[in-house]
Image (tube, rainbow, N blue to C red):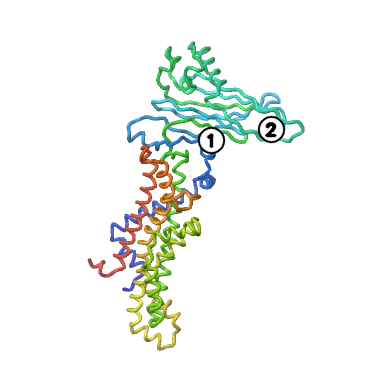
């Protein structure tokens, strides 16, 4: 191994355009990891396998950018959580208003809508009034409900409820509004509330034959509170659509962006940890074997041959089924087989370094074997270790994805392999749900490509023969 330093290594590395491209991909993966940790709620990650957490999302919806690829203008599913809040008082009644503003510029009508809210009150039951304002200025009353009375003697209670577009009273209110203000007689059972709210005005509105009224809409909820301690804890508005987010949703209504983003730091931690441990163990094992020689070298190499001869995949499957499928166990399984090939190369290099004159001089000075191994021989393999770690990361990532794909991964973790496993068992390919498998597949390819490029560039920068070529 030739002498090297971080400065000379970078000088050689940056001359390789492939290595710079790999470094750019690695920076992108790190940025996605930071975004996942900083912006994606930890609760969404923990609730990945909880179906009730994802009820507000559409089932098997393509990503929003599919509209631009296909030329369609399908409505985007919207989950609005940050209303404009105003408070006012009318005598002893306090009115809290939550207003949601959004633009609707699509060719098709929404599938449905849902308004969810949470209150706390200790006296008279609050009243809730929900209305919608269209781009043409028409204001439509949707619902007016009251919270249930508080039991006698009980303390302040929290109340969670929702107003669905399928409520019969909501349909009647919309039909009455159109009859009074527009002069259109609409049967509550004739057309959906979405068409009553989002359709253009006209005589054919009663049959639902008009197109979509595009523009800015406002849904307003007014909460009438009668007690001093009464308050509105939260609210959110869901406008049902057919496309959603940058990665779409799966058949279980889960937002795939959560799995893709959180899968990035999980994949990097698995790949880097397994690669570093495997290479470190392999180098230490090989250097000790090569320097000590004799019977110890013979015994260690025979054990290495036995480990090398064991078929890795069947043994990994056996370990996962017998010991467990947690992420830590899986990393330990991969390390168990990842050091074998590195140890052989490290032993051959150690044998060459052992014959160097300066090693003989150190031995004559009485230095202990441990100091010679870890101070004078092992550091000479750092260049090889760096390149090998970079090349071992994609192998670890793909191994975890492969085990997860066949159902032996950690089911509690939203890894890319687990997403591919879910897509496979739900028949995503047969049903045409291409986005379900595309996103994790692309991320696996990009992460592997990044480390392969970096490993090639490091090998070229540290290997004099390749540098000369």
In which quadrant will I find the C terminus?
Answer: bottom left
Foreground of the two, 131 or 290: 290
| In this rendering, position of residue 343 left or right of residue 167 | left
Q: Is mark 1 on a helix, strand or loop?
A: loop
Q: Which of marks 2 and 1 is nearer the N terminus?
A: 1
Q: Which residue lies furthest to the left in this view?
A: 469
Q: Do the residues labelled 2 and 1 touch (CB within 8 Å)?
A: no
What residue is disc 1 on? 82
What residue is disc 2 on? 121
| In this rendering, position of residue 367 left or right of residue 1 | right
> Could you say where residue 468 lies in the image, as x and y percent from the top left?
23, 68
Q: Is mark 2 on a helix, strand or loop?
A: strand
Q: Residue furthest bottom?
A: 364
Image position of 235 with respect to 288: above or below:
above
> Could you say where residue 101 lies in the image, as x and y percent from the top left?
50, 29
**Circle nearer the viewer, 2 or 1:** 2
Residue beneath the point at 41% across and 50% down: 405
Residue beneath the point at 38% across and 44% down: 437
> Could you say where residue 137 lies in the image, as x and y percent from the top left?
49, 19
> Image quadrant of residue 168?
top right
Residue beneath the point at 37% across and 57% down: 394
């Amino acid at each position: 191994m030739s002498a090297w330093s971080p400065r000379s290594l970078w000088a050689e590395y940056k001359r390789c355009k492939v290595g710079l491209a790999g470094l750019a991909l690695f920076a992108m993966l790190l940025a996605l990891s930071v975004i996942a940790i900083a912006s994606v709620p930890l609760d969404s990650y923990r609730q990945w396998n909880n179906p009730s957490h994802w009820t507000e999302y559409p089932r098997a919806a393509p990503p929003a950018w599919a509209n631009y690829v296909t030329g369609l203008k399908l409505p985007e599913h919207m989950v609005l959580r940050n209303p404009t809040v105003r408070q006012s008082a009318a005598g002893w009644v306090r009115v809290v208003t939550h207003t949601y503003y959004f633009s609707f510029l699509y060719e098709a009508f929404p599938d449905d809508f849902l308004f969810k809210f949470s209150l706390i009150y200790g006296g008279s039951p609050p009243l809730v009034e929900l209305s919608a304002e269209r781009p043409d200025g028409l204001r439509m009353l949707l619902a007016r409900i009251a919270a249930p009375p508080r039991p006698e003697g009980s303390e302040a209670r929290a109340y969670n409820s929702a107003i669905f577009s399928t409520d019969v009273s909501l349909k009647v209110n919309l039909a009455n509004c159109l009859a009074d203000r527009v002069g259109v007689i609409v049967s509550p059972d004739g057309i959906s509330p979405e068409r009553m709210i989002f359709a253009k005005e006209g005589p054919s509105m009663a049959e639902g034959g008009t197109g979509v009224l595009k523009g800015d809409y406002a849904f307003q909820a007014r909460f009438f509170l009668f007690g001093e301690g009464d308050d509105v804890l939260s609210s959110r508005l869901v406008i049902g659509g057919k496309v959603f987010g940058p990665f779409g949703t799966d058949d279980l209504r889960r937002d795939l962006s959560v799995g893709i983003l959180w899968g990035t730091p999980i994949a990097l931690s698995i790949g880097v940890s397994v690669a570093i441990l495997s290479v470190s163990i392999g180098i230490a094992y090989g250097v000790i074997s090569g320097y000590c020689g004799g019977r110890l070298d013979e015994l260690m190499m025979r054990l290495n041959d036995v480990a090398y001869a064991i078929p890795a995949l069947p043994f990994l499957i056996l370990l996962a089924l017998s010991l467990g499928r947690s992420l830590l166990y899986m990393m330990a399984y991969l390390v168990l087989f990842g050091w074998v090939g590195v140890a052989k190369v490290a032993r051959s290099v150690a044998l060459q370094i052992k014959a160097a004159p300066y090693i003989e001089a150190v031995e004559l000075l009485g230095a202990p074997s441990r100091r010679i191994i870890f101070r004078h021989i092992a550091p000479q393999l750092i260049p090889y270790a760096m390149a090998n770690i970079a090349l071992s990361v994609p192998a670890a990532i793909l191994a975890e994805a492969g085990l997860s794909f066949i159902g032996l991964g950690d089911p509690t973790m939203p890894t890319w392999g687990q997403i591919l496993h879910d897509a496979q068992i739900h028949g995503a390919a047969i049903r045409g749900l291409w986005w379900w498998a595309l996103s994790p597949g692309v991320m696996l390819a990009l992460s592997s490509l990044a480390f392969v490029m970096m490993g090639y560039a490091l090998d070229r920068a540290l290997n004099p023969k390749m540098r000369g070529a």
